[in-house]
Image (spheres, grey):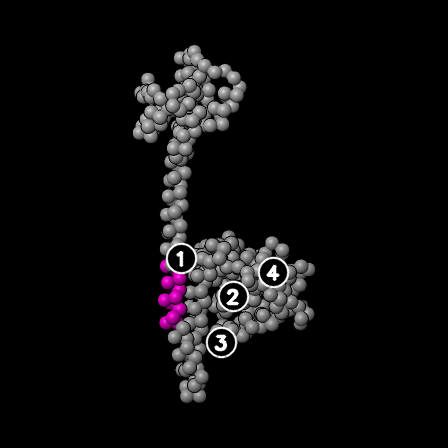
Amino acid sequence: GFKTITANSGKKAIEVFQAVRPDIVLLDIMMPDMDGYQVCKEIRRLQGDIHIPVIMVTALESIDDKERAAEVGADDFISKPIHKTELLIRINSLLRITSYQKRLYHKNRELQRLNLQLKQTQKAKEELIHMIVHDLKNPLTGIYGNLELLRFRKEQLDEKQAVLIDKAMVASERMMNMIQNILDVYKLSEGKIKPRLTEVNITELVNDCIDLFRIAASLKGVSIDILSDLEEDQTLTTDPDLMKRIIGNLLSNAIRHSPEKKTVIIGITHLGTHILLYVRDQGPGIPEELKERVFIPFEQLQSVGENRAVGSAGLGLTFSKMAIETLGGKIWVEDPPDRVGSIFKLKIPVKQPATLKSSV
């Protein structure tokens, strides 16, 4: 049941092998001009990526002959006189193995092709994200700069105009933060943001964050209070830029969801090897079944049975979760004791674990 092609010398065998690429080779050891060992060695050099089985056929019986056949790459060894049944069993066994190898080889080639395609798609996605962020940030920076210039001339504006400029600046800052979140969430998911660790005063860092949101809070009449049991010089080792972004996102959410004339509370307490920082608002709160989903990107959550949004559709909380986990901490949301509003809590290590390496 097999199609066979014969060659009466070693050199002819090599020529036939290159021309036909057979599925299996039966190779006599004793041949003119090139013996079977030399031919087998040359077949292995020429075969390429797909292994072609070779059965050495000989009247020689010594262990040395079999060892030498194995050294040059023979897959099996059969002695003369040849028994047809034994030969067919060995041929079929080797062909089954070769068939599996071929399938694995082609699957591997397909995986390599898909992997290359995925890398190309990923690169195009990265370039697109950078292009979008760059193209959005440039005009927005111009808008914000012009608003700042107008704000410096407050004495020439009436009260209503000054408020409108403040509102426009807050909206511009929020949009800039959203744009940056798009880029940073992608970078965090790809492991391309490495913390730049340094020792910082946690109370000063929180106060810096609050200063950035004074205007947004004042426009709603929202006050921001700090409750802290820390020593004034309490420090922690972290990435200050990432931490400001995280706390800033929580403050921004708290201010947006707080009713007018209410208070946002930032609490800071020491928990041994960690600092617990929380941000509490007095907004509508988040139902228990939605507490984990608020960290999913672009989720717009609605309370069951109510036609009201309870979560943000942006990336601020997604970024905050990914960033705090990069810093070895965790974030979660829970109800306050009086069940008014929500509390977002951060558990931050005072000292970073040895496994978290700072980028240079």
Q: Which residue is at the far bottom?
A: 156
Decide whether residue 313 is among the magenta residues: no
Q: Residue at x 42, y 23 (%)?
A: 35
Q: Which residue is at the far front?
A: 33
Q: What are the residue bounds of the magenta stretch?
A: 128-140
Q: Nearer the viewer, mark 2 or mark 1?
A: 1
Decide whether residue 133 is among the magenta residues: yes
Q: Amino acid at mark 4?
A: Ile
Report the magenta stretch's main SS.
Answer: helix
Check disc 3 and report the residue beneath it.
215
User: Which mark sits nearer the N-terminus, 2 or 1?
Assistant: 1
Q: Nearer the viewer, mark 4 or mark 3?
A: 4
Asked if residue 209 is positioned above or below residue 80 in the image, the reply reads: below
Asked if residue 208 is positioned above or below residue 308 in the image, the reply reads: below
Check disc 1 and report the residue beneath it.
126
Q: Residue 152 versus residue 30: which sits nearer the camera?
A: 30
- Check residue 245 in the rendering and tell me which mark sits there, or answer none: 2
Q: Residue at x 49, y 27 (%)?
A: 71
